[in-house]
Amino acid sequence: MADKSKKFIDVTAPGKKMERGHLHPLTQAMDKAGDVFQSMGFEIADGPELETEYYNFDALNIPADHPARAMQDTFWLRQNELKSQISNLKNNEKKLLLRTHTSSVQIRYMERNQPPFRIISPGRVFRMEATDATHETQFYQIEGLMVDRKTNLANLKAIIKIFLQRFFGDENIDIRFRASYFPFVVPGVEVDMKFKGKWLEIAGAGMVHPKILDNIKLDPNEWQGFAFGMSVDRLAMIKYKIDDIRLFYSGDLRFLKQF
Amino acid sequence: MKINYSWLQSHFEEKLPAPEKMAELLTMHSQEVESVEPKNGDYEFDVKILPNRAYDYVDYLGVIRDIAAILKLNAKISLPEPKEREIIFIKESDFEKILGVKISEKEITDILSRLGMETSKKEEIFSVGIPSERPDLKIKEDIAEEVARIYGYDKIEPIAPAGLLVPPKRNDALFFASVSRNIMVGLGFSEVYNYSFAKNGDWELQNPPSQDKKFLRTNLADGLLAKVKENSKYSKDIKIFELGKIFPKSGERMTLGSISNKADFYEMKGVADELLNGLGIDDFYYKDHDNRVAEVQAYGKTIGHIDTNSFEFDFDELVKLADESVEYEPVSKYPAIVRDIAVFVPLNEKVENVLDTIENTAGKLLIDTDLFDIYENEERKSLAFHLIFQSPEKTLTDDEANAIMKKIFEALEANNDWEVRR
């Protein structure tokens, strides 16, 4: 029974406007990915966006004449006369570029730490590209690395599959490996994800090339492991059904406030 | 590279799988077939050649050898001349060690020989002779890859890695970044990601994406201001922030910037206070600055600055100062006494100077000072404070509070330009 002394309050009238802020969808995607990988024992590592040619290419077994190093793919920095003279002497530790992947972080991490390694490196990367709905000059990557005495390709499959299932909250997600080639892994594979009945390209991966371990003074007969890389923008586009990558960098609050 | 289905078929006695199926097999085991187009009663495969396999596909026979190995068929081609060959050695156990699946010796030998390699095995070690068409094969892992792709990656079952589960180390920079983002969001600010490129800066690109993006940005403020302008077409209140790298001459710095189009200096200062306190940074202060309204200093270093409606902090410095340890201070059981005081001071006098005088005079029993009113006329301004006195040990008497208030009055009026309102 209604209390007659109760003051009349119109509960159907709108509440007073309170406004919370919104985390960027890519932040939310990276946080989610970070949580899943941390629960599997992966440490999160970061490193510079302004990187040297050595860490971005040489240390990763990418040949000197590889097309990825060209001006149509990589953003190079102008350096003063003296510096470029040094770089002509093949000192790639001095030639600066905007990192094209976060694999450079893995090299820096491995130099400073002792194996076994389990790390992921999320971060902003840059590619010289014409922009459209699926291509941007900057985007985010998550790269993973696990090096141990026995880590193998079957383990890689398990880690990527579990990650994708947890990230998308869908236990039905399946993955498959396709034959492929990247200079820093062998075997190298392309990873597809079966999402709502369709196969989508989602990552590049493989077993860390022995030359890379050798470069950082680890014995490839003793240590082995896998590496993988995927685009956070792509993961977020699939998760939130976003059809244009440029929205992430638009700063448009009508977009951002939906997350 | 375009290859016709009928040409593929001409190398085999047996009937090949249908074009679409054949394309899928090649995509999984060999190289990606990007499209299959019907053409003049035939089918044309468009194969995306992997950079390491170009040589093997020059005479198109690489694809024939791959099909022979995938389907276990005998191709009608002569195998490469077994002249001078590079030899790669690989232990039988290496296959399982790398791939995580046991593949029989028979299968390994079958795959490798159909791909044109000469294999022999002696005491667990395969020696594999590499044909000149395959200069991409150099180390034992390359051989493992050849076997794995033909055998089929789909037959490798996922196995969770074994090993001691040690909780990963925390990355402090990312941890405090997350704390800061949550504080800003809690205060009603939304996060934006702007471009790292700018019209001007210290680092110039050799190959800029466009003329207005020739440099790397040296601040977040310009980008944030531009976003306020764009959003103002649709929204009235725009409160945004960004946590990102800037690129001054010295290299790169992680930076946290924020702007609120409707805010004044004091509102942004309040946001900055809340942010720094939330990071466990207590010892900081605001100083006049020539070009900005104020700079923020801590431990002798400039950690950021505030303008009328925006601020920007050097986040690398904040991470160094951040401290999540909290020590509980017992709440006093005894009642507090509140006294108000108002002081007239010249218009250009700083609140900080008045506060310092009060706090330095009052001693430990003054637990909080709260500026609740500022009133200005043409000659001077009045600052009114609540002063809160409390002892952790006993109930304070009026006399004790009065004695402290008297000392404060005297200290304030020791300054000839100040006058306590009575």
Image (cartoon, coloured by chain):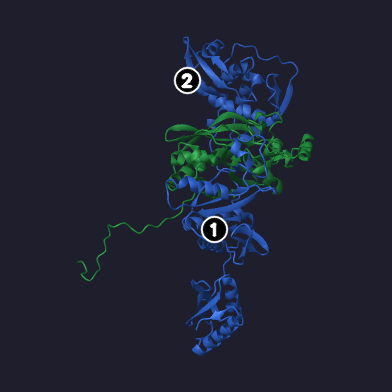
Amino acid type at mark 2: Glu
> Which residue is rendered at x = 62% and y = 51% of the image?
B254
Residue picked out by circle 1? B308
The answer to whether marks 1 and 2 sit on the same chain is yes
Question: x and y percent of residue A225 in the render?
Answer: 64, 40
State if disc 2 and disc 1 touch (CB < 8 Å): no
Give the mark, 1 or 2, whose residue is nearer the N terminus: 2
Res. A14 image quadrant? bottom left
Up/down of B49 relative to A190, above or below: above
Tell me the green chain.
A
| SS of the residue under disc 1 | loop
Left or right: where A87 falls relative to B263: right
> Which residue is rendered at x = 60% and y = 56% of the image?
B313
Left or right: where B215 falls relative to A175: right
- Determine if residue B400 is in view: yes
**Label 1: how many residues lie within 10 Å, few (<14), some (14-19) or many (20+)?**
some
Question: x and y percent of residue B11 in the render?
Answer: 57, 11
Question: x and y percent of residue B411 in the render?
Answer: 60, 82
Chain under numbered label 1: B
> Which residue is rendered at x = 56% and y = 85% of the image?
B404
> Which residue is rendered at x = 51% and y = 48% of the image?
B192
Task: State the hue of chain B.
Answer: blue
What whole-number distance in Å separates the C-alpha atoms at marks 1 and 2?
65 Å
- Determine if residue A30 is in view: no
Res. A150 image quadrant? top right
Q: Nearer the viewer, mark 1 or mark 2?
A: 1
Of A81 and B288, which appears nearest the observer? B288
Of A16 and B116, which appears nearest the observer? A16
Question: x and y percent of residue A146 in the render?
Answer: 62, 43
**Label 2: how many residues lie within 10 Å, few (<14), some (14-19) or many (20+)?**
some
Which residue sits furthest bottom? B399
Residue picked out by circle 2? B20
